[in-house]
Amino acid sequence: MLTRSFIALSFLYSSLVLLSGCSTVKQIETNPVIAQQLQTTSVDQFFTHDYQHTRDSFNQAVKLIQNENIPEQLDRQLYFLRAFSYFGPLDTVTPDDKQRLTNALIKLSTLQAFNDSPRLQEHFAVTLYLYYNTDDTALLLSELLPILNTQLTRLAKQPATEANDYALWETLRAYGLLLTDARKNNESALSKQLIDANISQALLAFASSPESLRAQQDWPRANAYWALGQYRLALPSGEDGNPTSAALAIDTAVAKIAKADVDLRGSIAKHTYTLGFHVNAFAGQESCQQRNEICQIPTLSEILPINYPCSNSLFILAQDLNQQELALSCEKLTSQESSFHQLLQTQNTPTANDGNYALRVVAFKNWSQYNAYGQLLFDIQTDNGGMYIEGTPSKPGNQATFFAYRQFWIEPEFAIWNLNHEYVHYLDGHFVKYGGFGHFPSKMVWWSEGLAEYVSKGNDNPTTFEVIKRDIEKAPTLAEIFATEYKDGQDRTYKWSYMAIRFLAENYHDDFVQLSHYLKTDYFEGYELLLDELSKHQQQFAVWLNDQAAAFENETAQAPAKINKLDRYGYRDYLIPSHFTQNNKHLHF
């Protein structure tokens, strides 16, 4: 029989083990040279490829955090970890290294200096979403989420200063960005861990509190809404496709908060709910209309005030493009038409019963705007990189539309993402393929996507050749490429399909054109039979692929080193607090 004193001692021992990170990993020996560099080098140098980012420097920084209690040095080492996530070799960091980091963060959270320092709490949150966003760190993350919850409660009560606001913002972003990674597979260990931790309760409690409105601004509530939207998407799906009780509970809880907010703040609160939770849960247009007491849909002209004609068959609706950008976009589109018609010998004659005489290009400012207003104005699914919707070509008044956005990550350069690729889909649908999307029963993905890649990029397609050269030993056959479905992945869908289209266009052009004629005359049986014949050129295709791979000069070695950037679609630009100053104290890539 266990005595009470033994139970108490066991509990104390368990608590101490938890405090130390439940770990028996081997400790890293101090490297005085690296430690000295970490303690004295300008932090600006951390965020460059010139600094020696190595697994050793990662572990030395973690060791310094584990044994340090001076806020300034803790700030420096935690900021180094942020820099390492962008510029360092992340694939060299081992599970034991992550365990040591977890131990150090747990130790850090027990320091009074941590509780008193919003800067250190900012770093803690950032470290979570940069290093604990994969399945192999899910169990480690479970040790750190209670600290994050406590931190959210603590920061909510702090006065509105820039330091406190940055810490609060990054804390909310930690929830949302972790959930954004988790929702990509809601059966993953990461997703299950975040759901099991019931972090929605911490977010709901914060969103419903007066503290989520800060100095007359509602960015904290908007960010909490966004994180809750990601939480909803990370929940397991219902077997019948309908929302689960857990998902409906989140909808109801957030709607209750929003309704109380609207009663106090009116349309401003509607805007916060709509762009915070509704569009980020991908709830769509109809649901917003049904919830019009808390959700609002703007007019088309409010969001897309620019209507610019390129030609009689093409016009652009834009959010913020200037005259030069509009003209350049039109030129890019119209210039590739002639090459398309020449390649496929269309005689510029549309398919039968196709009334899509003018393509509408809808160009949003960035993905955040596309995600929000693509849903609200056009009732489309926006969890993607843009889309072409042909509609029903034979329907009177049908409007074919390409939904796109500015390639915001290359600014100040200008381009519309996938503009030429998507325009080929229009040309293909109008001049080659009979009927609307889905008219033909199968074997169309390789044609649609490979053709769009080939016409829009021609022979200048280095990213494809990098994949071909890397994966040449496991190259799919022609027959396999012809049978490609979207579920087969991006490389198969776009890159290998591009290679098949290019092979046929260069080596069997007459047959290639004949394929298009069968599609134009709605003779799918002829198309399929010809594909079977073309599959017999597999040996020649394999030799041709090897020749292409051998001839490709991989420029990776000459290219500048890449930064391990955050997912460009992971966060929403309109959620960033407007009063934040962008400087080298809060760098992200």
Image (cartoon, helix red, strand yellow):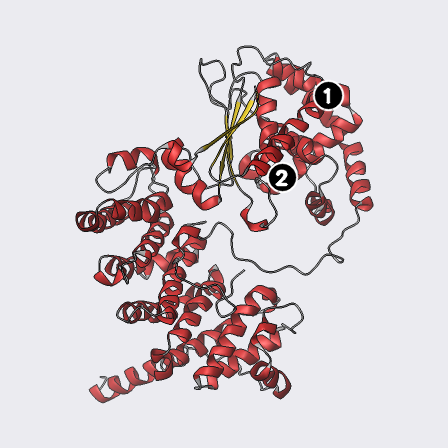
* Viewer-proximal residue among 87 and 511: 87
In the picture shown, does residue 320 fall above or below 125?
above
456 horizontally vs 249: left or right = right
Question: Would you identify the image quadrant in which residue 528 lies?
Answer: top right
Q: Nearer the viewer, residue 423 or 301?
A: 301
Q: Nearer the viewer, mark 1 or mark 2?
A: 1
- Please state which of residues 59 and 299 is positioned toward the viewer in this rendering: 299
Tell me the amino acid under the disc marked 2.
Answer: Arg
State the SS at label 2: helix
Q: Which residue is mark 2?
A: 492
Q: Is residue 193 left or right of residue 101?
A: left
Q: Amino acid at mark 1?
A: Gln
Distance from label 1 to label 2 (Cα)? Answer: 26 Å
* 129 up-or-down from 472: above or below: below
Q: Quadrant of the C terminus?
A: bottom right
* Residue 106, visible in the rendered structure: yes
